Image (spheres, rainbow, N blue to C red):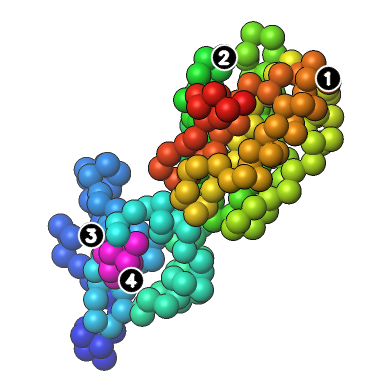
């Protein structure tokens, strides 16, 4: 079978075009996003190399790695040359990158502003395609004692049980809490139900002497702080 009619394997490229060798010789930072993905998939299809295929996949998501990470195995398999095994490899590789980003969040010993809380919430829920509700539990010095997922929902909402929130707060000995949930839609403004929930939890906290310090709505590119807007 001629080279044109077989998949382009990285081994068949000229040495200067091989991303694996380039990584070894020049370091990982020298590789483009397409070259890194090409290493994951190893080969392209009958008409294009792994790098060319990777460029086409990236172009479909406007070259945004976060958007690529949201594609499912089935969606990736729509690209010619991407079978189930390669799609799984891409998904797994990007998920590892997401988890690494979460682990690399700098420890913020004390919350001094909404941006500090945002930096803790964003790596966890910033680019999810479903809603999740999390709480930061703080002590008297506004230091974070614990962070906890309270609920998981769909694309448009998630249910929150106030009893779970404050039971956890009492277990941790928290004197303050900061709420955070994401909007997969990208709409950063809180909904009416978000506002009602915030007031409900604020009133429950007053009864238990646990102060609700803020509630953040997180999107992929921005956030909304109830405290900053003076509506808490």
- Is residue 48 toward the left or the right of residue 99 in the image? left
Q: Which residue is mark 4?
A: 43
Tell me if label 4 and label 3 are in contact, CB under 8 Å: no
Whether 213 is drawn above or below 50: the answer is: above
Q: Which residue is mark 2?
A: 110
Q: How busy is the neighbourhood of tag 4: few (under 14 within 10 Å), some, or many (20 plus)?
A: many
- Residue placed most toward the observer, 106 or 224: 224
The residue located at (74%, 31%) in the rendering is: 201
Q: Which residue is mark 3?
A: 18
On the question of residue 165 being in view, the answer is: yes
Question: Residue 47 appears at what percent x and percent y?
Answer: 24, 81
Question: Residue 117 appears at what percent x and percent y?
Answer: 54, 26
* Cα gap from disc 4 to disc 3, whole angstroms: 11 Å
Tell me if label 2 and label 4 are in contact, CB under 8 Å: no
Can residue 58 be found in the magenta stretch? yes
Q: How busy is the neighbourhood of tag 1: few (under 14 within 10 Å), some, or many (20 plus)?
A: few
* Cα gap from disc 2 to disc 4, whole angstroms: 48 Å
Question: Which residues make up the magenta segment?
Answer: 53-61
* Cα gap from disc 1 to disc 4, whole angstroms: 60 Å
| Closer to the eye: label 1 or 4 | 1
Mark 2 or 4, nearer chain start = 4
Q: How busy is the neighbourhood of tag 3: few (under 14 within 10 Å), some, or many (20 plus)?
A: some
- Residue placed most toward the observer, 151 or 205: 205
The quadrant holding residue 3 is bottom left
The residue located at (68%, 23%) in the rendering is: 212
| Closer to the eye: label 3 or 2 | 2
Q: How busy is the neighbourhood of tag 2: few (under 14 within 10 Å), some, or many (20 plus)?
A: some
Secondary structure of residue under mark 1: helix
* Cα gap from disc 3 to disc 2, whole angstroms: 47 Å
Q: Which residue is mark 1?
A: 208
């Amino acid at each position: 079978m001629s080279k044109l009619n077989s998949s382009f394997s990285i081994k068949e490229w000229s040495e200067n075009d091989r991303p694996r060798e380039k990584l070894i010789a020049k370091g990982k930072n020298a590789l483009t996003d397409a070259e890194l993905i090409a290493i994951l998939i190893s080969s392209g299809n009958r008409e294009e190399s792994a790098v060319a295929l990777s460029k086409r996949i990236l172009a479909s998501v406007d070259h945004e790695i976060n958007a690529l990470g949201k594609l499912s195995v089935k969606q990736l398999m729509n690209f010619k040359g991407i079978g189930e095994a390669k799609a799984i490899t891409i998904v797994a590789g990007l998920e590892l990158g997401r988890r690494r980003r979460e682990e690399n969040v700098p420890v913020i010993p004390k919350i001094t502003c909404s941006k500090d809380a945002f930096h803790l919430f964003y790596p966890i829920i910033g680019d999810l395609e479903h809603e999740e509700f999390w709480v930061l539990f703080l002590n008297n010095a506004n230091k974070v004692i614990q962070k906890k997922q309270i609920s998981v929902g769909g694309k448009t909402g998630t249910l929150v049980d106030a009893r779970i929130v404050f039971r956890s707060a009492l277990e941790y000995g928290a004197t303050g809490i900061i709420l955070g949930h994401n909007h997969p839609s990208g709409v950063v403004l809180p909904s009416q139900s978000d506002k009602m929930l915030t007031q409900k939890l604020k009133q429950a906290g007053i009864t238990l002497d646990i102060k609700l310090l803020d509630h953040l709505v997180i999107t992929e590119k921005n956030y909304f702080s109830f405290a900053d807007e003076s509506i808490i």
